[in-house]
Image: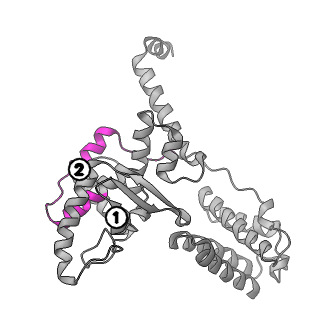
Amino acid sequence: MDDLRRAVEDFRRHLEEEKAVSSYTQKSYMTDLQQFVDFMERPGTAGGTGVESLTMIDPSDIRAFLVHLYQRKARKSSISRKVSALRSFFRFLVREGKIRINPAEAVQSPKIERYLPTFLQVDEMFTLLNAEFKEDVFGWRDRAIVELIYSSGIRVGELVGLNRKDVDLKEGLLKVKGKGRKERIVPFGRPAATALECYLGKRDRCMASQGDEKPEDPVFLNRWGKRLTTRSVGRIVNKYVALSGVKKRIGPHSLRHTFATHLMDEGADLRVIQELLGHQSLSTTQKYTSLTVNRLLDVYDRAHPRAKEVKKEK
């Protein structure tokens, strides 16, 4: 099905040039769509049912693909993401006049289990922040990374994408590019500002021999003077979690969840948290409400006399 492969490539260019999605999102879409293309081209399978061109694909082909994924023990969250990718792809083809009807719209996504993110309690977070960071440029870089994610709640992709001109140390503000390259202004606290200031001072002295710095230069660099990657940030966070003795599996995204949960626990407005996190939909932010309600119930069970009596009766 050459026309299907050409359509996928057209969609890739659309994502890159018109939608301006991140490279990570683009890669995710392409991986999901390539799996669908491979399935449709397998002889003797249901991609299978006499489909010879793009216009012949119908909801039964999408459902056959999902059955194939279930048989391969794919997770519901992964299958749901693939359905979403197919809907976007075929919606693009409808707009382009390549097909009349979006076959993926008639296919229901699987119901996925409610996901409650991992986060650190306040004392655990302070234990992590009190880990031993070296007093050299990379020690201060690592401290600034941990402090900044917890202080601002930015995504790890937004962190590594920061340039010097995006950081206002005096006002404690970051200009970050989120999903869809949407810009927003995010505040950060004094401890993060101090760590950033110390890191940048040491970094600039180390980099001075390589010529003048430009305002668009990356904030966070690796040992070779290149922009730090998201994978490297993950390794950095894992390193200090281990050094601190915190007994949880925590990555950079968990620090973002910790930021949001601590704000919620202290009574911050859900809309404000949504804006700080850069969530497009309020429903994405509402998962932190569940975390807070669970915590309230724990406190109630431990503190209220009548709650204790009910537990005894049980």
67 inside magenta stretch = no
Farthest front residue in view: 170
Q: Quick one: label 2 or label 1, which is nearer the N terminus?
A: 1
At label 2, counting other C-alpha atoms closer than 10 Å, the crowd grade (few under 14, some 14-19, many 20 or more) is: some
Question: Is residue 238 at all visible to an observer of this figure?
Answer: no
Which of the numbered marks, if any, corresponds to residue 233?
Answer: 1
- State which region is magenta: 116-145
Residue that extends furthest to the bottom in the rendered view of this protein: 2
Front residue of 68/211: it is: 211
Tell me which residue sits at (17%, 82%) in the image: 209
User: Which amino acid lies under the numbered mark 2 shown in the image of this protein?
Assistant: Ser
Regarding mark 2 in the picture, which secondary structure is present there?
Answer: helix
Question: Quick check: 78 left or right of 188?
Answer: right
Residue 119 magenta-drawn?
yes
- Please state which of residues 69 and 229 is positioned toward the viewer in this rendering: 229
Res. 134 in view: yes
Image quarter (top left, top right, bottom left or bottom right) of the N terminus: bottom right
Circles 2, 1 touching at the beta carbon (< 8 Å): no
Task: State the mark number for residue 11.
Answer: none
Say if 268 sits above or below 103 in the image: above
Residue drawn at 63 percent across, 50 percent down:
112
The residue carrying mark 2 is 244
| Residue 51 on image: x %, y % | 83, 79
Give residue 269's position: percent from left, percent from top. Answer: 50, 37
Q: Residue 104 falls in which quadrant of the image?
A: bottom right
- Residue 215, image x, y percentages: 33, 73
Residue reaching furthest to the left = 135
Whether residue 207 sits left or right of residue 286 in the image: it is: left
Colour scheme shown:
one colour
Q: Nearer the viewer, mark 2 or mark 1?
A: 1
- Measured in 3D between alpha carbons, the distance from the residue under mark 2 to the one under mark 1, in whole angstroms, is 17 Å
Residue 78 quadrant:
bottom right
